[in-house]
Image (cartoon, rainbow, N blue to C red):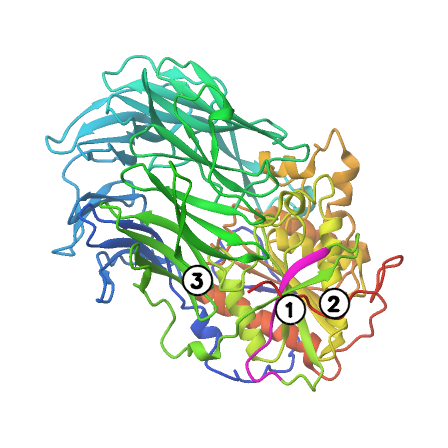
Amino acid sequence: MKIALLPLTLALSFTVLPVALAQPASPPAPRGSITIDRIADIKYPTDQQWSPDGKTVAFLWDWAGKQDIYMAQAGTPPVALTDFPVNPDILTSNIGHYEWLSADTILFSREAGLMTVSTKTQRPMRFPAFAGATGFSLSKDKTQITFVRGGQIWVGNIAAKTERQLTRINDGSRVSGPTISPDGMWVAFNTGFSSETPEPMPYNGNRLIVMRGRNWGSETHIVSVFSGDPVTIAGGGGGGGGGGGGHLWAMSATGPVLVRDEFSGDRKNREIVETDVKGVSHTIWKDYDPAWWSLANGARTVVSPDGKTIAFMSDRTGWAHLYAIPTDATSDTQAKQLSKGDFGDCFASWSPDSKSIAFAHSEKGNQQERFISIVDVATGKIQPVVTARGVNYEPAFSADGTKLAYLRSAAEHPQEVYTVDIAAAKPVRMTDSLPEGLNPADLTTPLGVHYPSRKDQKPVPATVMLGNNFDKTLKHPAIIWIHGSGADQNYLAWHPGAYRMYYSICQYFAQQGYVILTPDYRGSSGYSREWTTGAFNDLGGGETDDVNGGADYLKTLAYVDPDRIGVWGLSYGGFMTLQSIIRAPKLYAAAIDVAGVGDWETWTTGGTLLGRLGSTPVSDPGEYDRSAPVKHLDKIERPLLILQGTNDTNVPLWETLKVVDQLEKLGKPFDMAFYPGEIHFFRRAFTLRDAWRRSEAFFFDHLVTPAAPIKSSDAIMPGASPPGSTPVVAAQ
């Protein structure tokens, strides 16, 4: 085993003995302007918000861990409103929640306090009131603020800078997410319990301690701004989405009501529930899925500005579509389906006049791109607004309802902030996140394909990347990239979310001559309900056959060397990587597991995963055994590299330590690198540079060098039909 700790400041108590590292052949120099140094410096804009006067768009821009607030106006470059130094120990800085306080002032939280910044002076200042406030949100009219201080809920007057404490909670619970009702008379908030406890790992001795975080007892409460005892919402589990505090307020005929999505423990039932300020609840919509309610990737419930209508997504017709229902509805028959067809909707946003909804959607036959349309709720008429190829999503109306600000990624650029005049339908790009020197012409456009699964021959959607000037007369190495979360997906454009860094390194590998395949195995979002729930009660089974069918497909391509195929993935994709090389030990020449789950029983499971599993370790221990790579590592035969951040709260360090321990006990050779302080998605540039260079060297060593190829005998799974040889191009 080769161990690397980078940098040598690992904040854990264990000793690493010196190990002589093998010296692999050096990968060739970049064939174009896409370099590892450059892709590690790509910026990432999010959370775009219009100013109240509709003249300026503010957004957060993250540059490899350094996050600041920027503003942009059409025709001018973005301007940094903040420029905070990074923490010297972890090289990151973060902005908390922010909101426009006026047409030229933004209020935001940072380091357990509130600050303001003016678009005129561009100098952040401590807010001269509400010291120690965290978790804030503003009232609709911007006159009141609610926040958390000292474990209690407070409310304050912005102009007068007066404040009063609303709660006196002393049960040890953690208070969070306060949100003010539309009439300014009530505050909804969450409570819950959490702990950080040492996790015993007998195989590890007593020199390394990992902490397991646990959360339980989540409840939602409503309290009057005149104080008094909070009302606890029966079944409330921490809010329902929207707003700075994460709660949705609506207005019924009798007063304000809290709207939330509520799920059963097995995730088969989803209800939209309204609760009045006395704690009386009723259900206005109900979905049931015999597998699990699986909407993800922008499924959103939002209330109109006037509080009278609720927009939401449901897949009861087989696809995720947009619906609207009156707040005072007494039956779900009063809901109106606003879109229909074999495509999916997501990311709904109301117009200021509460008459229209902007939403993102795919198209029939093309589930790997997103476009933006506006629907008139009364007439059902749909107006296409953003039709450019790529991933266009998160539309937000300006205050006058004439413009949208949205996020867009494309084949030629990563995620950027755009605006569009709705009447003219002419998009304007507001940001440029590519680093200097990276030529967009060197980026390749992914091609949509389908291939048969090993499980049942069903077509698996995927994308293929071939570098510019790709020579199809030669045999090339290939790499399968497996997306994470189980419920994410790939696009015919730059990935807009957490996997954007892996899209960029895939672009680099394509430039270097690798053929890249990115499968959307069953369980991936953005497709029909049938495909999205196809992994139910079969975690790591059929979906792994979907991935391994991708290797079969690559072997049918005349320009792919069948003995030079690698596989890798992050998170759920790391788990799938391990499952792939366990179920088909000779199929791949090399594999990289980045922060993959080794055992679902010891991972901190949540409701979504339990729904996907369809069982618990008690009700079906066999499924948990089948889906635990750590219990089947004896089947691994090919080279493996493991990468893991020590500050990973998605897939904690102990999941990788269990895998490492078992590999060592089995005498399996592998390489690994831990990144001190790094999170799940490898945010910092120096981590990305090292991880990508190690990955490049590993794949080059095992997929490219003359001594690398090992003949594969796992070409076709026993009993499966030969895969088709012609890609099915996605509808354009």
Q: Secondary structure at mark 1?
A: loop
**Splitting the image into 4 quarters, where does residue 694 fall?**
bottom right
Q: Quadrant of the C terminus?
A: bottom right
Looking at the picture, does residue 336 appear above or below residue 628?
A: above
Left or right relative to 612: residue 391: left
**Residue highlighted by disc 2:** 553
**Is 460 within the magenta?**
yes
Q: Secondary structure at mark 2?
A: helix
Residue furthest left as drawn: 160
Left or right relative to 391: residue 378: left
Question: What is the tally of numbered marks visible in this picture?
Answer: 3
Q: Amino acid at mark 3?
A: Ser
Instruction: Find residue 587 and report its horizontal and vertical position in percent.
Output: 78, 65
Is residue 719 among what the camera can see? yes
Name which of mark 3 and mark 1 comes first in the sequence: 1
Circle on res. 409: 3
Asked whether 38 or 260 is in front, the reply is 260
**Mark 1: few, some, or many residues within 10 Å (few <14, many ≥20)?**
few
**Residue numbers of the magenta segment:** 459-470
Q: Residue at x 80, y 61 (%)?
A: 585
Q: Amino acid at mark 2?
A: Tyr
**Residue highlighted by disc 1:** 19
C-alpha distance separating marks 3 and 1 = 43 Å
**Splitting the image into 4 quarters, where does residue 727 fall?**
bottom right
